[in-house]
Amino acid sequence: MSAATRRSAEWFTRFFDADYAAELSEQKPPRQTRREVDFLLRSLRLPRGARILDVACGYGRHAAELSRRGFHVVGLDLSRPMLDEARRRFREGPRLRFVRGDMRRLGYAAGFDAVICFFTSFGYFAPGQNETVLRRMARALRPGGRLLVDHRNPAYDAALPRRHWYRAGRQRFILEDRHFDPRSKVTDCTQLVITAGGDGAVQRRFRVQEFSLAEWRRMLGQAGLRLIRAYAGYDGRAYRPASSERLIAVAEKAASGPRMDERMGNGRGRPRS
């Protein structure tokens, strides 16, 4: 793969900038974050004071709310602008820490009661790398720990119109030109972002691999995890393949048997340098 092709494939290194953080914060008010965390805690049934790894934490809204409720949280993200915004909004301390890192190279081992990955932050990588991410997430869990991945439903996205407008916050409007490949289940989307009173428009692009429930079950199993539940959304409705917009998978690491860290290397609960 040439350097230019690699830069194009790794769109996520440019997409999640300061403007996107501002846009997202307008769309996700604090009351929505609280509802999503309520759902997360009902789904994962975590012990008091549990340790949580928030992968692709963005500007830290879930990590901060979980910390406020007494959990110990590490928020990890690849985007410097997102982490800068997280640190601007929320004070780090004994129960909250933000770390820059690539989920493909997670270096934690058996240190967390839960790993969470919200808001379609998975499926960005080349074939095989998404499975690597799941193995790394599984390795970060203690035996009996749980993983929650919030993603899209490919059957739902296959039926979406190719082009549509929507409002993003108070002053932004977005035109999407979206192509979904039913064979690969990849969504390739170009967005035109128009800000009221702004100078012109900004174009950006993302590309996300989606997975059926059967594919999630297979990939999770290969990572040493067992799919225990699938939800349609943050209200706790059961996932329905034909109609659910989202597919939120909850999986559990076996409480006994060969440990992931023994198969993948050593280290306990700390990233490798």
Image: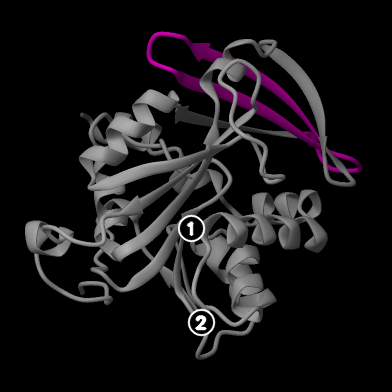
- Return the x and y of residue 31 as percentages of the image width and height: 82, 60
Between 151 and 17, the residue placed more toward the observer is 151
Badge nearest the viewer, 2 or 1: 2
Please provide the residue range marked out in magenta.
Answer: 173-200
Indicate the amino acid at tag 1: Ser
Q: Residue at x 74, y 49 (%)?
A: 23
Residue 225, given in percent of the width and then of the height, sits at 29, 47
Q: CA distance from mark 2 to mark 1?
A: 28 Å
Could one spot residue 75 in this view of the protein? yes
For mark 2, give the secondary structure: loop
Q: Is residue 128 above or below residue 86?
A: above
Quadrant location of the C terminus? bottom left
Is residue 161 found left or right of 93 in the rendered image? right
- 198 horizontally vs 70: left or right: right
Q: Measured along the vertical axis of the image, is residue 272 above or below residue 181? A: below
> Would you name the residue on which mark 1 appears?
79
Image point 52% across, 20% down: which residue?
154
Q: Position of residue 248 (x, y in %)?
A: 54, 40
Which three-letter amino acid code belongs to the residue tagged 2?
Answer: Gly
SS class, disc 1: loop
Q: Which residue is mark 2?
A: 49
Q: Main secondary structure of the magenta part?
A: strand
Q: Residue at x 26, y 36 (%)?
A: 3
How many badges with numbers are in the image?
Answer: 2
Magenta includes 216?
no
Q: Residue 163: image x %, image y %?
A: 71, 13
Query: What residue is shown at x 35% (from left), y 26% (from top)?
Result: 215
